[in-house]
Image: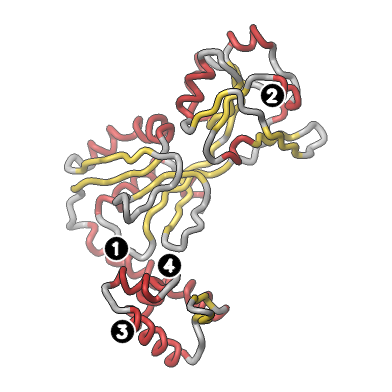
Amino acid sequence: MDKFGEMTVFLRVVEEGSFSGAGRRLALSPSAVSKLIARLEARLNVRLFERIAGAIRLTEEGAQFQRASQRVVDAMAEAENIAGAAETEVSGTLHIHTPLTTAKYLLAPLLPALMARHPALRLEFIIGTERGDFVKQGIDVAIHSGRPTELSLIGRPLMPRPWVIAASPAYLRAHGTPQTPDELLRHRCLNFTIRTQWNAWTFRESDGALKTIDIPRHIGANQGELLRTLAIEGLGVVRLAEFNIAADLASGALVPLLADYREKTDDMLYVLYPRGRVLAPRVRAFLNFLEESFPAGAAAR
């Protein structure tokens, strides 16, 4: 096996956390994978993995080799993509995993331009708030908040996601308007039943200090779109992504609250795709389209 092939096997072992897992993905026996890694270590004259009680973990040298190898594999994939881009028609089905609010408010308005550019492309959305399994669910690309921690995924910044606290005029007439963050503890609040870190609302005090409040949940849901509807119906105070409720704020269906206490540190949406694969033309075309559509994300890289 050539050096590039050795790097590919080594990276698969890192991703899977075992020789047997890497072997299953590569259609090799665990012993073949183990021997290949042993030969690689002998050639480099360094131990890449510690072998402890049947488990393996990267050594410091192994971690350095992993980072360098990943750059080589990514560069090779990018080179092949560039070489084939001019002659390959964008077609087939692109499977996109993302929350409903992202699909509805960010992606849907852009899709006419995408489909006009690539009329042979087909799209299938897999809606979910939690990150999906790329292999089991056949995901090509995903859009979610937070930089990925999985070694098997690349995450490109897409756009910052500001959050806004709001309530309907009817709710505020019935229950009053909170003037300070602490007053929220006496209000009916709508919050998430998943990613419960979103239920800790952070504010910036007048002296510049940050204050985080664990907001009690009057009504909970696992979808921001339902929380938006409940807020419009006057059922409580909600904290949602600005793009989710921008039209409601503009129309007056929802009223922004506690703007003077708003913490400006927003989380980032990322577009995720598998590392170390040669990207299909449909995936590459979609990534390029997103980069054109969200230039702030490209600038954040």
How far apart are the two marked residues, 4 and 1, measured between alpha carbons? 17 Å
Q: Residue at (45%, 27%) from the top-left corner?
A: 225
Going from the N terminus, do you reach mark 3 or mark 1 first? 3
Q: Which residue is mark 3?
A: 2
Q: Residue 189 vs residue 33: left or right? A: right
Q: Amino acid at mark 4?
A: Glu
Identify the residue position indicated by label 1 in the image: 278
Q: Nearer the viewer, residue 225 or 277?
A: 225
Q: Are marks 3 and 4 in contact (CB under 8 Å)?
A: no
Query: x%, y% of residue 202?
Result: 68, 36
Q: Measure the alpha-carbon separation of dots 2 and 4.
A: 44 Å
Asked which secondary structure carries label 4, the reply is helix
Q: Nearer the viewer, mark 3 or mark 4?
A: 4
Q: Residues within 10 Å of mark 3 (few under 14, many from 20)?
A: few
Q: Local crowd at mark 2 within 10 Å, few (<14), some, or many (≥20)?
A: some
Q: Which kind of residue does numbered mark 2 sit on?
A: Leu
Name the N-terminal-most of marks 2 and 3.
3
Q: Between 46 and 301, which is closer to the camera in this rendering?
A: 46
Q: Which one is closest to the eye, mark 2 or mark 4?
A: 4
Q: Marks 2 and 1, how far apart in space?
A: 47 Å
Query: Gap between marks 2 and 3, in whole Å?
Result: 61 Å
Write down the residue under mark 4.
15
C-alpha separation, residue under disc 3 versus residue under disc 4:
20 Å
* Furthest residue toward front: 53
Q: Which residue is mark 2?
A: 258
Residue depicted at x 41% and y 73%: 13
Say whether residue 296 is visible. Answer: no
The answer to the question of whether label 2 and label 3 lie on touching residues, with beta carbons closer than 8 A, is no
Residue 196: name its quadrant: top right
